[in-house]
Image: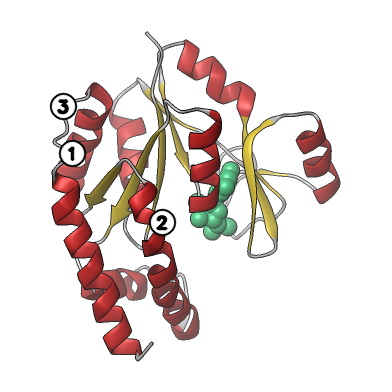
Amino acid sequence: MQGKLLVISGLSAAGKGTVAKALVEKFDNYVLSISATTRERRGSEVDGVDYFFISRDDFKKRIDGGDFLEYAEYVGNFYGTPKSFVIEKLNAGINVILEIEMQGALKVKKVYDEAVLVFFLPKSAKVQKERLINRKRDDESQIKKRIQQAIIDAEYAKHYDYILVNDDLEDSIKDMQKIVNGTYDKSKNIESMKILDKIVSDIREEQNV
Ligand code: 5GP
């Protein structure tokens, strides 16, 4: 049995990273793909754990060598998914999680139609803002930018197979397992889309955009 390729994206502070980490820690049939990037390493990040930090030259060579399943430029830096790791794990029956931005996600779907695209949302604009403030990673102007970015990112949700509202970690883990074994009720996407519309309209109202 082939593993499933799970591509997860979502609004800022939707908590997708936490869900991915929990799946990998809880079950031995999930693994996270480690991307290559040309961006600088941040504080506590470890090479080979968080990313493979490589130079632009190396990145270009790897593009030419066909090493990436997909790659994208994002705020001035390159990010790519190493192909061989993904193929090896899928062939071994392990589900591979890619936590990547939306253009990359759509590229993956193009080259690998069996990929399952999951878009994560926070429960509300209020929860998103609280999470962004509480995680203390960004200053006020960066938080504002991330919130505004959500209006643009929301446009991509319709291209995803599943839209999950990440309100409770355990529920999200169960939802992901149902998605993997094909028992998730897809009609729930309609409810999630309504929540996404409300988030976008609340952001627009608060930020006057
Ligand atoms: P950050 O620099 O904050 O770690 O990541 C910036 C964005 O790049 C995030 O949305 C992250 O999900 C995305 N990203 C990380 N790795 C990859 C990758 O291999 N390919 C693509 N397309 N995006 C990635």
User: Can residue 167 be seen in this snapshot?
Assistant: no
Callout 1: 10 Å neighbours few (<14), some, many (20+)?
few
Q: Position of residue 167 (x, y in %)?
A: 17, 55
Kindly report the distance in space between the C-alpha atoms of the residues bearing marks 2 and 1: 17 Å
- Earlier sequence position, callout 3 versus callout 2: 2
Residue visible at 76% across and 37% down in the picture: 63
Q: Is residue 101 above or below residue 62?
A: below
**x and y, in percent, of residue 102 in the image:** 48, 52
Q: Amino acid at mark 1?
A: Lys
Q: Nearer the viewer, mark 3 or mark 2?
A: 2
Residue 123 locus on image (x, y percent): 19, 63
Q: CA distance from mark 1 to mark 3?
A: 9 Å
**Dot 3 surroundings within 10 Å: few (below 14), some, or many (20 or more)?**
few
**Marks 3/2: CA distance?**
24 Å
Residue 105 screen position, x and y as percent: 49, 44
* Closer to us: 122 or 115: 115
SS for dot 2:
helix
Q: Could you say which quadrant of the image residue 80 lies in? A: top right
Q: Is disc 1 in contact with disc 3, using a CB cutoff of under 8 Å?
A: no
Quarter placement of the C terminus:
bottom left
In the shown orientation, is residue 155 left or right of residue 86?
left
| Cβ–Cβ under 8 Å for marks 3 and 2 | no
What type is the residue that disc 2 sits on?
Tyr
Residue at image position (55%, 41%) is: 107
**Residue farthest to the top, as pictured:** 1
Q: Which mark is residue 183?
A: 3
The residue under label 1 is 186
**Label 2 Cα neighbours within 10 Å, binned few <14 / some 14-19 / many ≥20:** some
Q: Which residue is mark 2?
A: 156
Nearest the viewer among 20 and 113 is 113
Q: Which quadrant, please, contains the N terminus?
A: top left
Q: Closer to the camera: disc 1 or disc 3? A: 1
